């Protein structure tokens, strides 16, 4: 299900260990911190996995936490690492080599949402992508 929804690379090792899989999925889903906490507090692996499947099946839009404006769709997501669509990216020489960044704000409420990364060379692909702060993602993803 995870591979189908976010196209994350190799999950085979985790699939054999449902408890680890459930925590991994909960930690990597593009949801608000409160929803993530709800998932992590569920007592029971099968209950947690069922809730995660429910969320993944209903996931279509990412909304601004402040004003609920749609900021992305599931089809817009680009997985940048084996950690999935969420992660902390740190590079002492800049964020992503070959990309310039600009702080971005929600067009509706002007809350800082994250960063827009733009290629500085025509050879780089993608030409641009967004880094959205998970703390700015609304609980409701449908």
Image (spheres, helix red, strand yellow):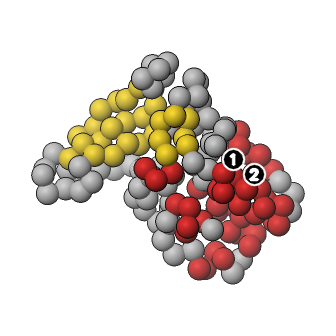
User: Is residue 66 depicted above or below 126 in this figure?
Assistant: above
Q: Which mark is residue 26?
A: none
Residue at (52% x, 34% y) in the render = 70
Q: Residues within 10 Å of mark 2 (few under 14, many from 20)?
A: many
Residue 114 x, y percent position in the rendering: 42, 34
Secondary structure found at label 1? helix
Residue 63 x, y percent position in the rendering: 55, 35
Secondary structure found at label 2? helix
Residue 37 x, y percent position in the rendering: 73, 45
Query: Image quarter for residue 17?
Result: bottom right
Q: Residues within 10 Å of mark 1 (few under 14, many from 20)?
A: some
Residue at (65% x, 56% y) in the render = 56
Residue 121 x, y percent position in the rendering: 13, 50
Question: CA separation, marks 2 and 1?
Answer: 5 Å
Quadrant position of the C terminus in the picture: top right
Residue at (37% x, 36% y) in the render = 115
Q: Is residue 136 visible?
A: no
User: Is residue 65 depicted above or below 81 in this figure?
Assistant: above
Q: Which mark is residue 39?
A: 2
Check contact, mark 2 vs mark 1: CB within 8 A.
yes
Q: 132 or 88: which is nearer to us?
A: 132
The residue that mark 1 highlights is: 36
């Amino acid at each position: 299900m995870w591979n189908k929804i976010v196209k994350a690379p190799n999950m085979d090792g985790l699939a054999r260990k449902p408890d680890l899989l459930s925590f991994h999925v909960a930690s990597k889903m593009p949801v608000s911190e409160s929803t993530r906490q709800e998932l992590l507090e569920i007592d029971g692996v099968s209950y947690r996995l069922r809730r995660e499947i429910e969320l993944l099946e209903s996931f279509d839009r990412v909304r601004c936490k402040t004003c609920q404006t749609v900021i992305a769709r599931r089809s817009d997501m680009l997985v940048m690492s084996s950690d999935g669509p969420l992660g902390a990216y740190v590079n002492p020489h800049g964020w992503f080599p070959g990309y310039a960044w600009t702080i971005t704000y929600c067009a509706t409420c002007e809350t800082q949402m994250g960063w827009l990364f733009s290629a500085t060379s025509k050879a780089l692909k993608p030409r641009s992508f967004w880094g959205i702060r998970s703390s700015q993602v609304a609980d409701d993803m449908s």
